[in-house]
Image: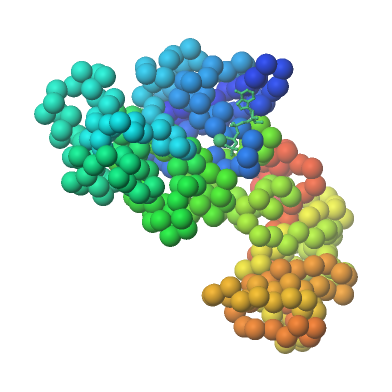
Amino acid sequence: MAQPIIEFKNVAMQYGETEVLKSIDLEIEQGKFYTLLGSSGSGKTTILRLMAGFLTPTGGDILFNGERINDVPPERRRINTVFQNYALFPNMNVAENVSFGMALKGKSKTEMKAKVAEMLDLVKLSGYEDREISELSGGQQQRVAIARALANEPEVLLLDEPLSALDYKLRKTMQYELRAIQQRLGITFVFVTHDQEEALAMSDWIFVMNDGKILQNGTPVDIYDEPINHFVAEFIGESNIVPGVMRKDYLVSFAGKDFENVDGGMRPNEPVEVVLRPEDLDLVPIDEGKLVVTIDTESFRGDYYEITAHDDDNNHWQIQATNQAEIGKRYGMYFDPEDIHIMRLNESEAAFDARLEQYDEES
Ligand SMILES: Nc1ncnc2c1ncn2[C@@H]1O[C@H](COP(=O)(O)OP(=O)(O)OP(=O)(O)O)[C@@H](O)[C@H]1O
Ligand SMILES: [Mg+2]
């Protein structure tokens, strides 16, 4: 593997007596789109501030291209930040905002003008050089903030919930555009959000955080399909989570029945949690289903029906169905073996990896 551009080794951060980050290990590689995903207060901004150099860790080391940078000030790091509130200078126009960093570095007027034009083109604001900040919409201000950060030619761009103030439609557009900018420039983005859909849509790699810790990291597909524990499964999308028992490899029992599945490597009769995503469940005639459910509620969601139902074991199910169902009526519920995801109880990610490795060697 290539050397990581940023590395955290056992990084801790304490504010006074309060420890807000506990032993964070992470690696950021050049040229990828990373997302820190977590609820409010989980420590996302703290990690960005440590990366940018606005904070010094109280424990552990931060490396940039292999060199320790714990005490290197922000202006000497090739890292720029787009803040959540944009932090634009209201008394300067667009061009002055974008060239602010270059002016500090004493770049020539011609050089700055060319760079401003290039950056505004990148964020689709060509011709807006002389506009005042107060004459821009929220989305346009957002773009200026991105252009300003990129004008400094950082190796890493940090973005702290940059889209949270935008309406749904603009947010979707900006997600797409940010991703396109990242790919076009080929630099590293570390993006912060508490919106799991946004994280799944944009990232090459996601760190799921809670309470000052990284619970799981991986590609969006890994995290969605193989959540490591109950918290991640709930956080990363709507889930049905029911108690179960692994009878043996590839056979799991839940809701009073045994089902073939694709997981193995657990103790016989080990208690587990079973995850089934609503979009993986279908309603079918009773004799074609794997379980029988009774419909409780139904609501139309545009491209599907959101249905809640319960089985005879009184497990509750959320189902995204393409067809309407009748409340109070019994249906078959169908899913494929590979849609059944198994989570062990109270297992750390390290222990899980070690066990999987051992299992792969044995099989
Ligand atoms: N200067 C500070 N002094 C004391 N505690 C702080 C300080 N800054 C942050 N904290 C605490 O550290 C924890 C993590 O904060 P942080 O800002 O990193 O969270 P976050 O994940 O970015 O949350 P949000 O999604 O709300 O922005 C919180 O419990 C917060 O109250
Ligand atoms: Mg924050």
User: Can residue 196 be seen in the rendering of this structure?
Assistant: yes
Is residue 111 left or right of 216 when viewed as pictured? left
Q: Look at 66% across and 60% down and name the residue there.
A: 238
The quadrant in which residue 346 appears is top right
Indicate which quadrant contains ligand 1. top right
Above-or-below relation of 361 to 78: below
Residue at far left of view? 110
Query: Going 74% across and 76% down the picture, which residue do you hit?
Result: 297
Quarter of image, res 157: top left
Q: Position of residue 166 (x, y in %)?
A: 45, 51
At a point 77% along the width and 79% down the height, the residue shown is 295
- The residue that appears at 27% across and 31% down in the rendered structure is 92
Q: Position of residue 323 (x, y in %)?
A: 62, 83
Report whether 290 appears left or right of 279.
right
| Image-quadrant location for residue 156 | top left
Query: In the visual, does 6 lie left or right of 186?
Result: right
Q: Looking at the picture, tell me which residue is in the foreground, 277 or 128.
A: 128
How many labels, in total? 0
Q: Position of residue 332 (x, y in %)?
A: 75, 81
Observer able to see residue 203 = no
Front residue (pair 316, 256): 316
Q: If the image is split into quadrants, where does the N terminus sit?
A: top left
**333 or 131, nearer to the observer:** 131
Q: Is residue 289 above or below residue 194?
A: below
The colour mode here is rainbow
Q: Position of residue 89 (x, y in %)?
A: 34, 31
Above/below status of 229 relative to 57: below
Q: As drawn, is 343 to the left or to the right of 254? A: left
